[in-house]
Each structure stands twice: as structure tokens, then as C-alpha cells.
């Protein structure tokens, strides 16, 4: 989980023009299936109400609960992209990979994610044993729910072992101490995504990490970077976008909204223009009806 306060709403509102909702995209969000605050169905309803027309629920290492494609409610519609956020180890640190699919997530990648969920549960249990907390629920070991450091932080706060979630992250929950490192290399995560027909995109990279590691990750098969997000200034977004274009990578945009505190879907969204390469890989184009297959 990236614990940053949303900065601003760079892309304007979802106000209708000529009776049609302008296309707006948010391709990074979370539900209760990982470390989000709300069930997947509720997150989808929030996205519709917020005026989003292209949306992705990208829970950590867990397969989607809702079908890909068009969803409607209250006279509004959006296109749901199947995706997941996969954790991988690179250069001694945990990095995150957003993996998107042009249609339904294939069975092979679903099976891979169930394995990653089970590995997360084992990692959680190891940390819980060190910290004196209860183990992960049974559903986490079967792949139905991804347990994260946020859940450990909540347990520490509930046990009055930490005053706040942020304090727990800064204290006992440093990766490599009580919390074991993830057991999947970033390069292997990218290769698995590509083999399943997915689009592996680097989630919320810092500018420094892009400078240090992007070339090697592109050589490993990375196809894009999440360059547009509310935690970055416009200048930083433009710099990352230029780096992506220079290397022929696709650009994605995401709020990384978890629904905790003041986080709300719709405060950040992106227009289709910068996402053109991503949309082409999905085989989609914006229309007055929402999204349709590209000609």
C-alpha cells in the first residue's frame, strides 16, 4: 500500500458535456479483498457515482471478484479493466507491478495470484508470530483475500501496541525485520504477466527509481509506467511521461485509492489522451456510449 495523501484533482470534474459523460480513467484502486476499506461491489458503485468511465480494481496479489467489461448503475456506465497489483523483489527492495488484461483475466494468471495470496498469508503468519498477533484467516491461505502490512498495522493498533497505522509502519513493520521480504523476483513477476497476455506496468515509481532501474526492467519485459498519479506534481508527471515516451512505453494513471480516511474515488482521474498506448493495447477507444472496441 502506498500511504500518500492525495494532492489535488488534476484532471477536472466529470461534468457532462452535451448530455454525455466525458471519458475519465482511474486504473489503480483497492477493495476489502486486499487492504482497501470497502467491498469490491461498493468500490465499483463509488466509481460509477464519481463519474469514472474507465476503471480498474487492482487489489494486491488477488484475482478479480467482478467481471471485466461494461457495468451500469443509476443510468451511468463504466468499463472495468481486469488487473492486479503484484509485489516483487528488486535490488533488495519490494516494488509493485500493475498487471492489466484486455478482457477477462485468464485462468493461468488467476492460479498464479492464488499462489501469491497463499505466500502472502504465510508471510503474514511469520510476522504475526514474531509480533504476538493472531494468524491470517483461512480464506487468505486459499487465495480469496490478500493480507498486507496494513492488516498487521491494524492489528497492532487494535492491540494498543501502536498509536496509529502510520506509527506501526514506521516502527515494527519494517520489511526485513518482523516482516519477511517477498519471495518473488520482479523480473519473474513481469515474465509471468507477459506469458499470460497481461500488460505489466510499474506501479507508483519514484523518479529516482526510474532513473536507476527502468532500463533493466524494460529489458525484463516491462511495458509501461504509472506516470500520472495525485501524489506527484504536474512537473514530475510530465518528466515521467517523457521518460515513458522516450522508451516506447505505455502510460497509465491511477489514484491508488484505498478508501481510508479522506480518500475518495473521483478526486483524481485522467483523460484518454495520455493513455492512448494503453487503450490501444486493450483494444478500446472512447465513444459517446462509454468505451467500445477499437476499429
Image: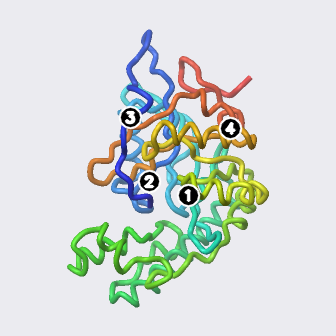
> Alpha carbon of mark 2 to alpha carbon of mark 4: how far?
21 Å
At which x and y percent is residue 163? 21, 73
- How packed mark 2 is, by other alpha carbons closer than 10 Å (few <14, some 14-19, many 20 or more), is many
- Return the residue at label 4: 282
- Return the residue at label 2: 30
Residue in view at x 24 percent, y 81 percent? 161
> Alpha carbon of mark 3 to alpha carbon of mark 4: how far?
25 Å
Which quarter of the figure has residue 209? bottom right
Comparing labels 3 and 4, the label whose residue is closer to the camera: 3
From the viewer's side, name the closer residue of 123 and 164.
164
Residue in view at x 70 percent, y 26 percent? 294
Comparing labels 3 and 1, the label whose residue is closer to the camera: 3
> Alpha carbon of mark 2 to alpha carbon of mark 1: how far?
9 Å
At which x and y percent is residue 47? 41, 38
Location of residue 142 with respect to 193 vertically, above or below:
below
Mark 3 in CB contact with mark 1 (< 8 angstroms): no
In terms of sequence position, does the residue under pointer 2 or pointer 4 come before the other? 2
Location of residue 205 with respect to 76 vertically, above or below:
below
SS at badge 4? helix
SS at badge 2? loop
Which quarter of the figure has residue 93? bottom right
Mark 2 in CB contact with mark 3 (< 8 angstroms): no
In this image, 130 relative to 159: left or right? right
- Return the residue at label 3: 9
SS at badge 1? strand
In terms of sequence position, does the residue under pointer 3 or pointer 4 come before the other? 3
- Return the residue at label 1: 85
Amino acid at each position: 500500500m502506498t500511504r500518500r495523501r492525495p494532492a489535488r484533482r488534476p484532471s477536472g470534474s466529470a461534468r457532462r458535456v452535451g448530455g454525455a459523460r466525458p471519458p475519465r480513467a482511474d486504473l489503480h484502486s483497492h477493495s476489502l479483498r486486499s487492504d482497501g476499506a470497502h467491498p469490491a461491489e461498493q468500490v465499483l458503485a463509488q466509481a460509477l457515482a464519481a463519474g469514472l468511465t474507465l476503471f480498474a480494481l487492482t487489489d494486491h496479489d488477488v484475482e478479480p471478484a467482478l467481471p471485466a467489461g461494461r457495468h451500469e448503475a443509476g443510468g451511468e456506465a463504466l468499463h472495468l479493466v481486469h488487473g492486479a497489483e503484484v509485489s516483487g523483489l528488486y535490488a533488495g527492495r519490494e516494488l509493485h507491478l500493475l498487471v492489466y488484461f484486455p478482457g477477462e483475466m485468464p485462468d493461468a494468471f488467476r492460479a498464479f495470484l492464488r499462489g501469491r495470496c497463499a505466500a502472502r498469508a504465510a508471510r503474514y503468519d511469520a510476522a504475526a508470530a514474531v509480533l504476538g498477533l493472531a494468524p491470517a484467516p483461512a480464506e487468505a491461505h486459499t487465495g480469496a483475500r490478500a493480507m498486507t502490512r496494513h492488516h498487521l498495522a491494524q492489528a497492532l493498533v487494535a492491540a494498543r501496541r501502536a498509536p496509529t497505522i502510520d506509527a506501526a509502519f514506521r516502527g515494527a513493520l519494517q520489511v526485513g525485520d518482523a516482516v519477511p521480504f517477498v519471495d518473488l523476483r520482479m523480473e519473474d513477476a513481469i515474465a509471468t504477466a507477459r506469458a499470460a497476455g497481461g500488460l505489466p506496468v510499474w506501479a507508483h515509481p519514484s523518479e529516482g527509481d526510474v532513473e536507476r532501474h527502468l532500463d533493466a526492467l524494460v529489458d525484463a519485459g516491462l511495458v509501461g509506467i504509472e506516470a500520472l498519479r495525485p501524489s506527484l506534481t504536474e512537473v514530475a508527471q510530465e518528466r515521467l511521461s517523457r521518460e515513458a515516451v522516450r522508451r516506447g512505453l505505455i502510460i497509465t494513471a491511477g489514484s491508488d485509492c484505498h478508501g481510508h480516511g479522506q480518500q475518495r474515488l473521483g478526486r483524481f482521474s485522467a483523460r484518454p489522451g495520455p493513455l492512448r498506448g494503453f487503450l490501444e493495447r486493450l483494444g478500446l477507444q472512447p465513444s459517446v456510449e462509454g468505451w467500445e472496441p477499437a476499429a
